[in-house]
Amino acid sequence: MDKVEEITKRNSTKVWNLHNALTDPDQLEFKVDPLEAPENLAKQFHEEHRQIQDIADRLRESGVDSTALLAHGTTVEIILKEAADLDVDMNVVGTHGRGAMYQLLMCSFSEEIIHQSRYPVLVIRTHKRT
C-alpha cells in the first residue's frame, strides 16, 4: 500500500479498497463440521474486510481519500465490474510475483485484469522474493 499512498498523495485521487468475499473452492475445508463451515467462512470474511478497512483508515489518516468496499463475485469479473461502476481512472492490483511455471499452470488474476480491463492497470508486487 505504500506505493498506492505515494501515488495518490501526489495526484489527490480517491482510492477504493475492494475486498471480494468469495472463497476459492479449493480453500473450503471439508474436515470441519459442516455446521461450523459457514461460521468459519463468515469469520474469515470479517477478518479480511477488517484488514481492508484498516488500510482505508491508514490511507485517510495520511490524507488520502479512501473507502473500503465489500463485494461478492468471481474475482476478475467483480474487479472489472466495480471499476466500471465507479468509473475509475486506474486499477491497482497486487501480484505475488510467482515464476513462469506457476503462471503457466495457474492463471494470474492480475494478468487476467490486465488483459480484460478497459482502464490502465498498475500491478504492484505484494511479496518480496526470497
Image (cartoon, rainbow, N blue to C red):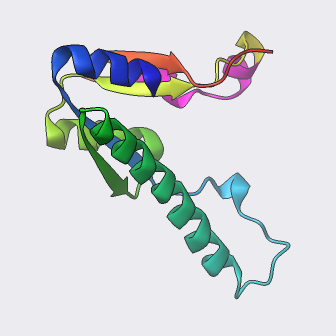
- Which residue appears at 45% of the width and 17% of the height? 123
Q: Is 113 drawn above or below residue 104 in the view shown?
A: below
Horizontal side of residue 20 vs 63, given as left or right: right
Q: Quadrant of residue 108?
A: top right
Q: Is residue 14 visible?
A: yes
Which residue is at 26% across, 22% downward? Answer: 8
Quarter holding the C terminus is: top right
Q: Residue 71 placed where, x, y %?
A: 36, 56
Quadrant of the rendering where the N terminus is positioned: top left
Q: How many tags in the picture?
A: 0
Looking at the picture, does residue 34 appear above or below residue 58? below
- Position in image of residue 107 (x %, y %): 61, 27
In reply to whether residue 27 is colored magenta, the answer given is no
- Prevalent SS, magenta region: helix
Q: Report the residue that reaches farthest toward the bottom.
A: 35
Of all residues, the one furthest to the right in this rendering is 31
- Is 72 left, or right, of 99 in this rendering? left
For the record, the magenta segment spans: 102-113
Is residue 103 covered in magenta? yes
- The location of residue 127, given as percent across then percent down, is 65, 24
User: Quarter-wise, where is residue 103 in the image?
Assistant: top right
Q: Is residue 130 left or right of residue 2?
A: right
Q: Position of residue 69 (x, y in %)?
A: 32, 52
Using the image as rendered, state which of residue 1 and residue 99 is in the foreground: 1
- For this rendering, which residue is in front, 21 or 49? 49
Residue 117 vs residue 106: left or right? left
* Residue 116 seen in render: no
- The residue lying at 61 percent from left, 64 percent from top is 44
